[in-house]
Amino acid sequence: MSHVHHHHALNAAFWLTAAFAVVELVGGLMANSLALLADAGHMVSDVAALGLAMFAGRIAGRPAHRQMTYGYGRAKVLAAQVNGLMLWFLSGWIVWEAAGRLANPPVVQGGMVLWIAALGLIINLIVMRWLHGSHDINTRAAYWHVLGDALGSVAAIVAGGVILLTGWMPIDPILSFIVAGILAWGGWRLVRETTLELMEAVPQGVDPGAMEGAMQAVEGVTGIHHIHIWRLPAGKLAMSAHIGIDEMAHWTELLPALLKILKQYDIEHATLQPETGCDDNHCSVSGQNQKN
């Protein structure tokens, strides 16, 4: 997804979701349905999530400078984490309301719930199609909000159908518990992923042991230590390490071979420091840093 297409998709999704959130909120109040109100509340959170994603995207586009050498790309990660916390908050509100309604189920207009929820599902599927395919964590956070909302619309449709056919009112708060569980799980995934990235943990899918073994197998390499692997704000992978070698004169031949191995692990930025005279605890530092 190109940057321009990404921006237009977020913008269109924001306004379409905002318009229907108002419709669903009014419909939920008229139908007296918690499932529909919960779905409307989630759509409001979708609007906030999409707006936050748009705002973070603009900040992340600012150029790097001497005080911010990595640029402002982490703004997207912070926005995604806030969106994850918002999912938790919304989940807790739905559980609170559902517990009260389960004890004393109100009369719900099943037909209105059914039709408004069906329209909401269509809107959600359109927005999901616009946002699908992005590898940007900020957009994926907004996508998760919309996906959870689509599942909430399905729950509201089921609740409306059951009430319309059987008149069994407790189905409305019961399905709201399910929606709350889905939102809490999505929030946990976002908070966990963004926290790990902010802590500069090894990115998911990267095997440091396999990478080290492949580098260690290069003839002339005697040891590897002080390995660090992280994801840059722009989404690319970076790595730094101290490389023990038998002869410093061989470094110009070893470096291209090592960088070729790192490319196989999608490492696009590497800083490798050659060292000689390595034993289990010490190396003679050459004072040379090599970057690709």
Image (cartoon, helix red, strand yellow):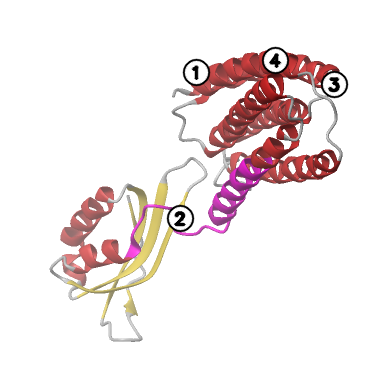
Residue 230: mark in rendering: 2
What segment is highlighted magenta in the picture? 180-208
* Label whose residue precedes the other's in the sequence (3 or 2): 3
Residue 112 horizontal/vertical position (percent): 74, 14
Circle 4 sits on which residue? 116
Q: Nearer the viewer, mark 4 or mark 1?
A: 4
Circle 3 sits on which residue? 29
The residue drawn where x is 23% and y is 67% is: 213
Q: Is 189 one of the magenta-colored residues?
A: yes
The residue drawn where x is 46% and y is 42% is: 235
- How would you rate the neighbour count of disc 4 (Cα within 10 Å): few for under 14, some for 14-19, many for 20 or more? many
- Look at the image and tell me whether residue 65 can be seen: no
> Magenta: predominant secondary structure element?
helix
- Examine the image and state in which quarter residue 109 appears: top right
* Label whose residue precedes the other's in the sequence (3 or 1): 1
* Label whose residue precedes the other's in the sequence (4 or 1): 1
Question: What SS does tag 2 mark?
Answer: strand
Amino acid type of the residue that numbered disc 2 sits on in the rendered structure: Trp
Amino acid type of the residue that numbered disc 3 sits on in the rendered structure: Leu
- Image check: 36 left or right of 283? right
Circle 1 sits on which residue? 5
Question: What SS does tag 3 mark?
Answer: helix
Alpha carbon separation for disc pair 3 and 4: 12 Å
The residue drawn where x is 58% and y is 15% is: 122
Amino acid type of the residue that numbered disc 4 sits on in the rendered structure: Ile
